[in-house]
Image (cartoon, rainbow, N blue to C red):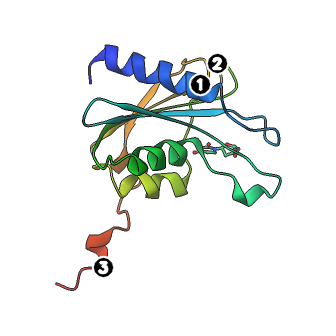
Amino acid sequence: MDGKIVSRLILEARMAAANAYCPYSEYAVGAALLASDGTIWRGCNVENASYGVTCCAERTALFAAVAAGHRAFDALAVVAGPDGGPPASPCGVCRQALAEFCSSDMPVYCASLSGENLKETTIGAMLPDSFSRSTMSRS
Ligand code: THU
């Protein structure tokens, strides 16, 4: 994917992370999802005193995009703290949620909160043999 688009997505993810509500973990996460019409959907993690209610940045971005009518996506960037730390790594629940709408070869760019330590992967590499509607087909 064009380096300019990757840089833009990382920047958007960093801006999303600035809105993270994470008083419990103090681990800010930001996601930027590129829809096939070129729009970019941001998400951050939103925590809760009842910890299990927390929503991850990736699903916040995905659900905002789907709620606005988007169902086709071309790329995802995720950043997470601390600055200069290891790249973000989407959790298993988010991998499954993304696999519902994103093709297995869709690129995913993961970096630290400051955008360093960039790592490129794909939805399929993150979640091989994923459970999908075809898994349930009878024929
Ligand atoms: N988190 C995300 O936002 N995305 C992930 O894929 C992993 C975890 C958030 C949830 C929680 O607010 C914090 O990171 C620590 O788990």
At x 25%, y 37%, the residue is: 36
Is 90 on the left-hand or right-hand side of 4? right
Residue at image mark 2? 84
Separation of residues labelled 1 and 2 (CA atoms) = 6 Å
Choose the circle earlier in sequence order: 1 or 2: 2
Q: Give above or below for 16 relative to 84.
A: below
Question: Is residue 42 in view?
Answer: yes
Disc 2 secondary structure class: loop
Residue at image mark 1? 112
Question: Alpha-carbon neighbours of circle 1 within 10 Å: few (<14), some, or many (≥20)?
Answer: many
- Kindly give the residue lying farthest to the bottom in the view shown: 138
At x 60%, y 17%, the residue is: 114
Residue 42, percent from left and from top = 49, 33
Labels 1 & 2 near each other (Cβ < 8 A):
yes
Q: Give above or below for 75 relative to 84.
A: below
Disc 3 secondary structure class: helix
Question: Is residue 86 in view?
Answer: no
**Quadrant of the snapshot with the C terminus:** bottom left
In this orientation, which residue lies closer to the viewer: 91 or 66?
A: 66
Quadrant containing ligand 1 reads top right
Choose the circle earlier in sequence order: 2 or 3: 2
Image quadrant in which you'd find residue 113: top right
Residue 35, percent from left and from top = 32, 37
In this orientation, which residue lies closer to the viewer: 20 or 94?
A: 20
Residue 84, percent from left and from top = 64, 18
At x 41%, y 44%, the residue is: 65
Residue at image mark 3? 136
